[in-house]
Amino acid sequence: MPLLEVENVTKRFGGIVALDGVSFVAQPGEIVGLIGPNGAGKTTAFNVITRLYTPDEGDVRFEGKSLLGVRPSGVVTRGIARTFQNVELFRGMSVLDNVRVGAHARHGDQGADDLLYYVNLHSLRYRPASELPYGTQKRVELARALASSPRLLLLDEPAGGLSHEEVEQLGTFIKRMRDDYELTILLVEHHMGLVMSTADRVHVLDFGRKIAEGTPAEVQGDKQVIEAYLGATS
Amino acid sequence: MRLKLALEVLGLLALAALIAVMPQLVSSFTAYEMATVGMYFIALLGLSILTGYSGQISLGHGAFMAIGGYTTAVLSVNGVYGHHIRDLWTIPIAGVVAGVAGLLVGIPALRLSGLYLALITFGIAVSFRQIPLKFDHFLGGTSGKVLSLLKTPFGLSATPNNWIYYLTWGIAFVLLVAAWLFVRGKPGRTLKAIRDSEIAAASSGISLARYKTLAFAMSAFYAGVAGSLYAIARGFMNPDVFPIVLSVYLVAALALGGVDSFLGLIVGASAIYVLVNRTADVTQWINHLPAVNLNPQRPGMPDVIFGAVLIVVLIILPTGVGGALRRLFGPLTSRLYSKS
Ligand SMILES: Nc1ncnc2c1ncn2[C@@H]1O[C@H](COP(=O)(O)OP(=O)(O)OP(=O)(O)O)[C@@H](O)[C@H]1O
Ligand SMILES: [Mg+2]
């Protein structure tokens, strides 16, 4: 059984159809890429899965059970954690306290120390999150998400704003994290190199519709996908 | 981090000692003045939990103080069981009544943020004034209600001024420790998380509605206790005991003290006291400056001065007095933390 099933989801904002009958699944242990040009609906899909938005049509199921009856604050206790495209840290709190809040959803704040070593932030644990460079803040967000012991992790553009080397390390790190914590990962990313090297399967959105799915190689050669990206950049 | 805890406990113990010996060092009248500062301090503690921690603003906390004051006035004057209820018993009741009112305001406040919340709560402060006038047979209208003067209990030899001092600062200390215990662990982190990012807080499993209304109720409880003490100390209660502008002073004093710095709030509370009760003195101090000649009798003068002081302080110390202290000691303590 798939861990996550997004089924025929439509989400409208006034006249804009941000998601138009989108379906995809994530199998346990997979890294699933979700790509598409700007405004394609990727973040909206994350917001629907985490219940910040309620879809107009369709269903989202996690471990076979619908999430539509779950409150936004109940999603993480089901086992879904996320990061945000534009870093949503608790800026006035220390790195450690950010991670501890992530751990609240589970049992307490044990394990926060281990996690901080894992993401290599332990020496910065008492620093206010707002004082850290952007790339480091993204790691804090990742640690906070991991602290809730999720089974599904949603990453919204984790490579955004990172340097070339950082992106390469990130790719390795994402796969290592999946193995060490037995995660399933949904990865939204514009950095094609990263998606192609880490994802097991890729789904492509354009203007709210799913236009392709397959292995990274299959999707890369897809005519519609190439057109969507060229159309978006020209 | 253990060091930080030790420092905080030490600070609390030092404060307790200071509170205990202070009346021996100052005149009875000064002790009474300090008691009043303690009442503002209690109200500011609550406001700090609301604004400094949960990130919600209230320009209506004077109304919660008034609810506390009226609760005490009604219970001790009329006596619900047909006899005199001791003033002291009414203090926690006043806190609870105000706390329930705070909860009721906190629920619609969930839908508002920032400026709108400020406006609505200010509207509450303004319209609350009408309630004692409307129910004048019960609440005493404009002329108000006279409370029996607080007597020193149990044959203690303290003067009434020292007694109200110890009563107020005793309660203030307990409520300070309670607030400290509340914010230093999981609940404090939860409120700060909501303040810093609602969507990240919700996605971390935090129920925004539960904690935001809890913060409102707690802060109103503190304001209610403060208002009750104030009514007891003054010996009467009418709509002018807590003027509308007090709500604004409270928020300004919070900024002055540093929104999430409990000890800095004592500075903020003193500022309110001086502003409300010692206007003429303040004007005189300022007149010592070269080329300044203010007339203390001019209406609005205290507000102008308070406003000017606030602006100057916030330019020099944008995070208030508490924030400045933290910055002063921060480099020292964080170096020590990293070793612990
Ligand atoms: N809360 C909202 N209110 C109105 N419109 C919205 C809202 N959220 C998203 N949209 C619109 O939905 C569409 C999809 O936006 P979304 O943020 O999901 O795109 P995206 O694929 O994440 O793009 P990007 O790569 O730029 O992050 C856009 O047209 C956007 O303007
Ligand atoms: Mg996006």
Image (spheres, coloured by chain):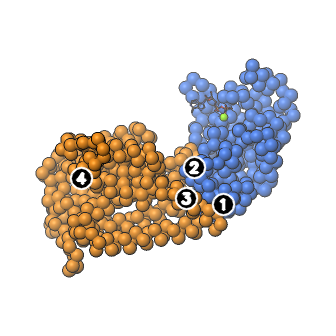
Chain colours: A blue, B orange
x, y percent for residue B91: 28, 64
> Can the viewer see residue B104 in this picture?
no
Mark 2 or 3, which is nearer the eye?
3
Residue beneath disc 4 = B281
Q: Which mark is residue B327?
A: none
Specify the amino acid type for callout 2.
Phe
Q: Quadrant of the C terminus of chain A?
A: top right
Q: Which mark is residue B330?
A: 3
Q: Which residue type carries mark 3?
A: Gly
Chain letter for mark 2: A
Dot in front, 4 or 2: 4
Labels 4 and 1 within one chain = no
Marks 2 and 3 belong to one chain: no
Subunit of mark 1?
Answer: A
Q: Mark 4 — on which chain does it sit?
A: B
**Badge 4 element:** helix
- Residue, disc 2: A90
Q: Nearer the viewer, mark 4 or mark 1?
A: 4
Say which mark, if any, is on residue A112: 1
* Residue nearest the observer in this picture, A63 or B223: B223
Do tag 4 and tag 1 residues touch (Cβ < 8 Å)? no
